[in-house]
Image (cartoon, rainbow, N blue to C red):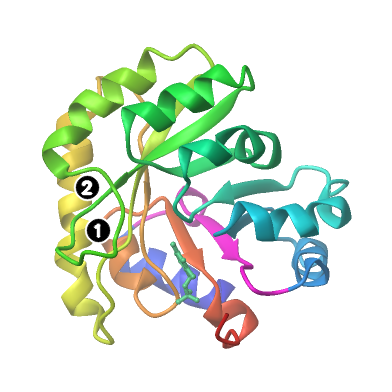
Amino acid sequence: MDERIEQACRDAGRRRDEITLVAVTKVFPAAVIVEAYEAGLRDFGENYVQEFEGKQAEVRGLEGARFHLIGHLQSNKSRRAAELFDVIQTVDTLKLARRLNETGLRLEVMLEVKLSEEESKHGAEPEAVAELADAVRAQPNLTLAGLMTMPPWYDDPERTRPYFRRLREIAERVTRPGEPMALSMGMSHDFEAAIQEGATHIRVGTALFGKRKKA
Ligand SMILES: *Cc1c(COP(=O)(O)O)cnc(C)c1O
């Protein structure tokens, strides 16, 4: 995995330390997180609040580990999510941002942007991102950390590349001067293209841990 990321960085003319590998551990037991931590990983992505709730006792003591929620969050679960996660990557409505802020817990958030036409995909419409970004900046407990997207699934990374490029263009449009803006995009099969298009966070499950059993 490290070799693949390093090669992608060399090809893209970027430094390895610009990229955070978020290890996606959904479906796998807490022991897999602990093992990955011992192997040096520090950022972990989980899709479901409830699933991670069941693992948290075993991973809570991992010093310096950061847990990212990368699955859709319903606003009625925002308190639990704020207690469990360090970063919520899937904020897509003003209501959810407000709910998270109201928990009083400090959180980093990314805005999930919907770039695909698929009904099942969540995320804010591209036209709504600027306003949502401003709304998050106005919440005292939230730090706007970046944008995230989940393109439609294609085997061929050249077909997801245009989505990565669009997310970067949206970030360029909504970022204020000097404001850091992460780009969470790219998964096991297409993170090289994402790194070339400016990803700062790649979310990788299968390439690290093998195929998941269907939930
Ligand atoms: C499962 C998942 C990933 C990881 O996908 P892999 O193909 O296993 O690398 C990344 N992002 C999100 C939002 C996911 O749900």
Q: Is residue 136 magenta?
A: no
Q: Residue at x 20, y 24 (%)?
A: 131
Instruction: Name the element at disc 1.
Output: loop
Residue 56 visible, this orientation = yes
| Residue 168: mark in rendering | 2
Asked whether disc 1 touches disc 2, contact meaning CB atoms under 8 Å apart, the reply is yes
Image location of residue 9, percent across then percent down? 40, 64
Quadrant of the frame with the N terminus = bottom right
Splitting the image into 4 quarters, where does residue 7 fall?
bottom left
Q: Position of residue 61 (x, y in %)?
A: 88, 46
Q: Is residue 142 above or below residue 207?
A: above
| Marks 1, 2: nearer the viewer | 2
The 10 Å Cα crowd at callout 1, few under 14, some 14 to 19, many 20 or more, is: many
Q: Name the residue that disc number 1 marks.
A: 197
Q: In the image, residue 17 lies at what x, y percent? A: 52, 50
Q: Residue 201 in the image: x percent, y percent?
A: 45, 53
Q: Residue at x 32, y 61 (%)?
A: 150
Q: Is residue 205 left or right of residue 28?
A: left
Tell me which label, 1 or 2, sits earlier in the chain. Answer: 2
Quadrant occupied by the C terminus: bottom right
Q: CA distance from mark 1 to mark 2?
A: 7 Å
- Per the rendered image, the range of residues in magenta is 14-28
The image quarter in which residue 194 lies: bottom left
- Local secondary structure at mark 2: helix
132 with respect to 77 (left or right): left
| Residue 210 found in image quarter | bottom right
The amino acid type, in three-letter code, at marker 1 is Glu
Q: Residues within 10 Å of mark 2 (few under 14, many from 20)?
A: many
